[in-house]
Image: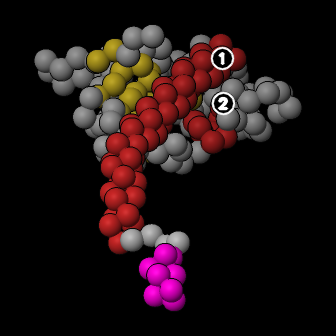
Amino acid sequence: MLRDKLHDSKGFTLIELLIVVAIISIIAAIAIPALLRARIAANESAAIGDMRTVISGGAAYNVANGGFYDNNLACLTAPFSGCIPGYPVNTPNFLDSQLTSLLAKGGYNRSYLGGSAPVGLNTVISSATSVTSYVYWATPSIGGQTGIRGFAADASGLICFSPTGDPALTTGSIALDSPGVACNILSD
């Protein structure tokens, strides 16, 4: 009788535990890659959204700065002292300080390059660091893990992408195209 009670325990056998572990492993093998793809898609969408924000902020700054962009991206964030002459310091920002700081965001590294200085710049109405164009890049911090494509937005308003994660080439007023290589235009 005592012997029957010992064999009548309520625990799991080793086989049952191995089956449960195998099922959990199969579910994880299916779910984890899907979650990583979703994360990459979210990071890329955020980078594209930031590109559009930079284009809009740059266009608004262009109007306020006598028709020019700025080589100093920080000029698009208040306070505007030292940027647009006579521009009120208490006005809203053209861009968020996170974008102008060029710090990595959402799995993407950021960089910015202003174009050439305008000829005959009137520093009474325009910033002394004015330029005729710009390019803003976002490239994956860890290629294939935080993003697949690299992006670039320029003064033309186009967003280009590189399918390899390298910095994208642009067709704007800064000629960054290599001979025979065109901008891969991101369609809406």
Residue depicted at x 52% and y 42%: 106
Q: Is residue 6 above or below residue 18?
A: below
Q: Is residue 83 magenta?
A: no
Q: Amino acid at mark 1?
A: Ala
Q: Amino acid at mark 2?
A: Leu
Describe the element under mark 1 as helix, strand or loop: helix
Q: Give the residue pinned by disc 1.
A: 60
Q: Is residue 4 magenta?
A: yes
Could you say where residue 143 lies in the image, as x and y percent from the top left? 31, 45
Q: Residue furthest top?
A: 188
Horizontal relation, residue 146 to residue 1: left or right: left
Q: Quadrant of residue 176?
A: top left
- Which numbered disc covers residue 133? none
Which residue is at the front of the view, 138 or 118? 138
Q: Quadrant of residue 95?
A: top right
Horizontal relation, residue 105 to residue 80: left or right: left
Which residue is at the front of the view, 3 or 122? 3
Q: Is residue 146 above or below residue 91?
A: below
Question: Bounds of the magenta span?
Answer: 1-9
